[in-house]
Amino acid sequence: MSRTDAALAGVLVLATVTVTLAVPAGPPYRPVDAAAVALAAAGPLALLWRQAAPLASLVAADAVVVVNAAAGYSIGYLPWPAWIALFTCFAAGGRRLRLAAAAVAVLGAAGYVTLDRVDSLAALPDIAMTSLVAVVAGELSRRRALAAAAGAREAAESRAQALAAERLLLQERGRLARELHDSLGHTVNVMVMQAGVGRRVFDDNPTFAREALGSIESAGRSALDELDRLLRVLQPLERRARAGPFAPTVADLEELADRIRATGRPVELHTDGGPLSAGAARALYRIVQEALTNAVRHTPSGPIRVEVSRVADRVLLDVTNEGRDLPDPVPGRGLVNMRERARLEGGELEAGPVEGGFRVHAVLPAGTGVPA
């Protein structure tokens, strides 16, 4: 029982009882007595459960009308609770409830016309018209509520889709940020180191300086190609063909090693990993790329070893470089990106100082596809 229903029932009780007492009907109806007042109050009280049990409210309100007619009292305002309950059944109910409510309304009207002391056939058009108004108003209210609910659902679905699209966009931005950091960051670091080496030996070893310049040019072109590929990913609506996903191979690892060798650091590369899935191959390449970049940035000399091996369905990667008294790594963007790439492929990565140097160790699922 809601407060609205209680207030509505209270107002109608007051109205029907007041009219019954203030305007008593003459013959052939019975004089007003306690039973008439009780029936005048009982009809509106049926609305106390109008929203919780609309059909029961309609049955109770129509029953009061029929009993009142059978007892010989004037009808007064008693039809109003029945019409309000009929409206509620059509406004809030399903098809079965609406059909049941229509049947109850017809039976109630028939009972009243049959039992009333006055020939009430003349009142049938008014009863039918008022009942029709209640039915139409209830149906319109129901359709309006359904439309509002459908609109709310669509709005909720749109918000959910927008949130999902935003999450995908953030994930894609994060992926592209990792790509830019791993690829362009590595290339720029190598170019800076090669330029520094070339500048220092320019007078004493011009041949090596020219080789360094050639390596810088080659690395710069590679960086531009990588940047162009990423820009095509960011602008998929361009008319030109969209670049496919980067699928690195052993040759690409050799190229990485050659770039580092051009800075003067020896790099030993050993691979026997066999074929990898495209995702695992990209993750492996980017981890090697970042590990080599960190090695040349944080250690001044010494060989760097890259070993790729396969054990069952896992690929093991070790990148080690010599160094003394190396501190524990600070979790920067490079280490975070390496661990995230390994995690996204279902693998794991560890990085930290070891005896005589620094080691990056990754374990990745092999899958099948791109030769590693």
Image (cartoon, grey):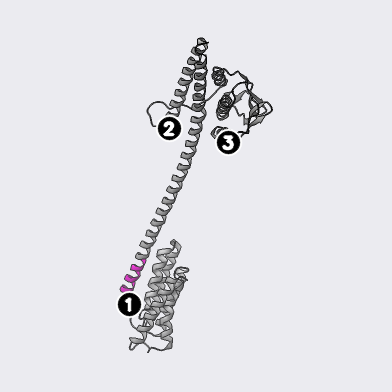
- Return the x and y of residue 43 as percentages of the image width and height: 42, 78
- Which element type, helix, strand or loop, lies under badge 3? loop
Q: Earlier in the sequence, mark 2 or mark 3?
A: 2
**Numbered disc 2: secondary structure:** helix
| Label 1 or label 3, whichever comes before in sequence order | 1
Marked residue nearer the N-terminal end (2 or 1): 1
Measure how far apart labels 1 and 3 are at the Cα level.
91 Å
Q: Residue furthest right?
A: 355
In the rendered structure, the answer to whether residue 239 lies left or right of residue 353 reads left
Q: Which mark is residue 331?
A: 3
| Eye-nearest disc, 2 or 1 | 2
Query: In terms of secondary structure, where does tag 1 sit?
Result: helix
State the image coordinates of residue 36 (x, y, percent, origin top left): 41, 85
Residue 345 percent coordinates (x, y): 58, 33
Left or right of 192? Residue 139 is: left
2 vs 3, front mark: 3
Per the image, the residue denoted by label 1 is: 121
- Callout 1 amino acid: Leu
Q: Quadrant of residue 302?
A: top right
Figure check: 351 above or below 11: above
Depth order, front residue of 280/42: 280
Q: Which residue is mark 2?
A: 234
The segment highlighted magenta reads 125-135
Residue neighbourhood size for the residue with mark 3, other residues' Cα within 10 Å, grouped as few (<14), some (14–19), many (≥20): few
Image quarter of the C terminus: top right
